Image (cartoon, rainbow, N blue to C red):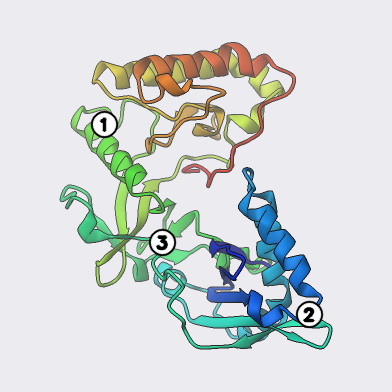
Amino acid sequence: MSHTVIDSHIELDSSWVTVMCRATRFHITVSHRDIRRSRFVTEYSEMVAKAMDDDDEEDHDVLCEWIVDPCLPYFRESTLNVPKEITFEDFYYPPTHHLKLLVSGSSLCPKATRDRGTMNAFRLMIPSGDLPPFSEVPRSKASDLRIISDTKWDDYKSEIPQKAIISDGTSRFFKPADDKKQLLREVDMHLRIRHAGLQDKIKVANLHSIVVSDDAKMTIGLLFDLIPSTGDSLYSHKNSASAAEHHARWKQQVTATVKQLHSHDLVWGDVHPGNIVIDTSLNAWVVDFGGGFIVEFVPRKKAGTKDGDWQGVGKIFDEWMFEKHAFLVPKERGCPL
């Protein structure tokens, strides 16, 4: 059953995970004390040890799924009447079930329990009072935004949304407020792009609005104009016929965008193939001004600098595009497609 782990805490004495499944939140706890006399205690202890010494998070993910799996029937029974049309308010302020895993015969089974105060209900949000007012940027209320539904696929109710339908029926790209520093840089960069008069001169998706809870106390994310695209970043065009045909064009377009940014003392920052989007007319757009870097493309010491931007562009178009095997695609939420 489709679900997404949105938060977790791992310790030997007690571990918990918070899961979204069909617009419903489940907070699941497993205690060493509750399983200590069962065959599960050894398995649990070994997985915790691996997860706590896990750099790539694979063992962490294995433990999370071990905790979640016994709860899937409970998820199914608890989400039978979820409406197909849900808003961002529905997703970010969902009904919540608190569960603990107990041993029943030869199995682990979930049991409903009280809220023990371990869950961070605002894990995916930032208090609006912690942010500048950004008075130039409109606000969109979460209840006015619908998540794009898919009658054949329930993941849209379980995963953090990537697109929103606004009140006029059109769609926008959604970027969640899961990192305060990145959100601040993203908004600041788009305001500076606007003030520099570059909005209609460079291929960058415009900032549409800031998404807030209905009481405006929490900031949920940002909305951007959609790029007319099938969903492909440059990673999808690696070693393709279109890459061979349009390489020079894409390099020229990205180079022109970066030159325009630099001429106004603006730095792109997170230069890598996943942040170059190819639209339906096979033009290259630049996305993501939240900062960060991938060392395969921008050296750590050059991150956030103009030199870093140029090293990243050169790495992509003069080396990476011609390699037979691309670097692994980083975990990312996507682009304004």
Q: Amino acid at mark 3?
A: Gly
Residue at 46%, 76% in the rendered image: 94
User: Few, some or many C-alpha atoms within 10 Å of disc 3 (few <14, some 14-19, many ≥20)?
Assistant: few
Residues 199 and 177: in front is 177
Residues 246 and 251: in front is 251
Mark-to-mark CA distance, 3 and 1: 27 Å
Question: Along the horizontal axis of the image, is 14 left or right of 137?
Answer: right
For residue 193, which numbered disc appears in the image? 1
User: Few, some or many C-alpha atoms within 10 Å of disc 2 (few <14, some 14-19, many ≥20)?
Assistant: some
Please identify, in this view, whether the residue under mark 2 or under mark 1 is nearer the observer.
Answer: 2
Q: Position of residue 251 (x, y in %)?
A: 51, 16
Q: Secondary structure at mark 2?
A: loop
Badge 3 is on which residue? 169
Q: Amino acid at mark 2?
A: Ser
Residue at 63%, 66% in the rendered image: 3
Question: Along the horizontal axis of the image, is 186 left or right of 114?
Answer: left
Mark-to-mark CA distance, 2 and 1: 60 Å
Q: Position of residue 319 (x, y in %)?
A: 61, 13
Marks 2 and 1 close (CB-CB < 8 Å): no
Marks 3 and 2 close (CB-CB < 8 Å): no
Residue 1 visible from this viewpoint: no
Mark-to-mark CA distance, 3 and 2: 54 Å
Q: Is residue 76 above or below residue 207?
A: below
User: Few, some or many C-alpha atoms within 10 Å of disc 1 (few <14, some 14-19, many ≥20)?
Assistant: many
Q: Position of residue 329 (x, y in %)?
A: 63, 35
Counting residues from the start of the chain, the first of labels 3 and 1 encountered is: 3
Q: Secondary structure at mark 3?
A: loop
Q: Is residue 157 above or below residue 70?
A: above
Q: Is residue 62 above or below residue 262?
A: below
Q: Secondary structure at mark 1?
A: helix
Counting residues from the start of the chain, the first of labels 2 and 1 encountered is: 2
Q: Amino acid at mark 1?
A: Ile
